[in-house]
Image (spheres, helix red, strand yellow):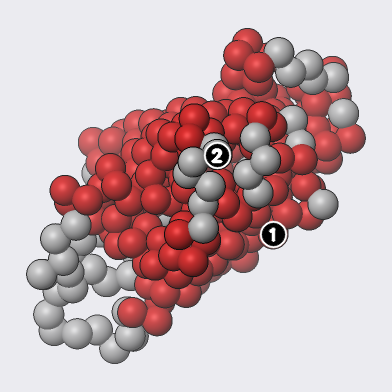
Amino acid sequence: MGVVAGLIAALAWTLASSLWRGLATSLSALQLNGLKNAIACLALLPVLMGLPWHQEVPGLLLLLISGGIGISLGDSFYLAALRRLGTRRTLTLESLSPLAAASGGLLLMGERLSSLAWLGTVMVTVSVVLVARQQPPDGTSRNDRSTRAQITGLTMALAAVICGVTGAAVSRNVLLTTDLSPIQSASARLLGGLLLLLPWLRFNRAFPQPRPKIARWPRVLLATGLGTILGILLQQVVLQRLPLGVGITVLSTAPVMALLVARAEGDHPRTSGWLASALAVAGVALAVRG
């Protein structure tokens, strides 16, 4: 169940990332992150109202902090990188998460991984090297194609990895030590992500004029439903059922699935891009088996 949930979550994040990248908006990454978190919290309001605040105070507070780190900061860095690097390259850089997660699980939580799991984690990480130097998609703006913007994008993607893994580690610890369900923990994390972003939620000029041909709100709602609600809910299932390093590795199959949307973004993965995807799949298989 943990592996299946991880693969579905990776697909949901891939599709949501492509939708966010293609959204015509003047919102900053922080504002866009706040918007999707507000929509997600509204959708999960019945769950939020039923959270056991009196019985699980320490755990819920940790989940709020986890959401602040992993969702407020991590997703904001991710959305900023997405604009500069494109879906496939950003998701591939996110594959650094398994190595960081495995190391964190070993050092902080005492989790032991087998040799096969470590090998799989390293293989997924090596795939990052094969694609990080490739050019951004054709649709990337001229300013975002500059060397400086690309370095900024790479830096933000790495920051997103650090924040994401840190938030996931805190969340997994809560799931293992409390009776909170995955949907309760996901809701609490989203609330924490929203609270930290409240100062930036000013949407009076959210979308530029004139209006584009493609409607934006259906795209926003679909991307939020796929990536923020479904993706984070399934992530909590993964963190509950799999060791941290293995769980993050399964979630990091998104770069492979990003090949499905590459052509639509004007992205042209070379032989090294396809090789990196195959390497990532093999690495995930070894990590799960180990």
Residue holding disc 1: 8
**Residue 83 sits in which quadrant?**
bottom left
N-term mark: 1 or 2: 1
The amino acid sitting under disc 1 is Ile
Q: Nearer the viewer, residue 65 or 275?
A: 65
Residue 78 is at least partly visible in this image: no
Q: Describe residue 226's horizontal placement relative to residue 98 as left or right.
A: left
Q: Secondary structure at mark 1?
A: helix
Residue at image position (33%, 79%) is: 217
Q: Residue at x 48, y 35 (%)?
A: 57
Task: Name the spot of residue 270 as percent of width and height, x first.
Answer: 58, 51
Identify the mark at residue 55; answer none if there is no mark. Answer: 2
Of badges 1 and 2, nearer the viewer stands 2
Q: Is residue 218 left or right of residue 146?
A: right
| Viewer-proximal residue among 225 and 178 | 178
Q: Give above or below for 232 relative to 244.
A: below
- Mark 2 packing: few (<14 Cα in 10 Å), some, or many (20+)? few
Q: Please give the label number shown on residue 129.
A: none
Pick the residue in front: 171 or 284.
Answer: 171
Residue positioned 51% across, 58% down in the render: 50
| Placement of 279 over or under 9, stated as above or below | above
Provide residue 279's location: percent of width, then percent of height.
Answer: 73, 39
Residue 159 visible in this rendered orientation of the protein: yes
Q: Dot 1 surroundings within 10 Å: few (below 14), some, or many (20 or more)?
A: some
Q: Residue furthest right?
A: 289
Q: Going by the picture, which residue comes out furthest to the bottom?
A: 213
Q: Residue drawn 44% across and 65% down?
A: 45
Q: Position of residue 148 (x, y in %)?
A: 23, 36
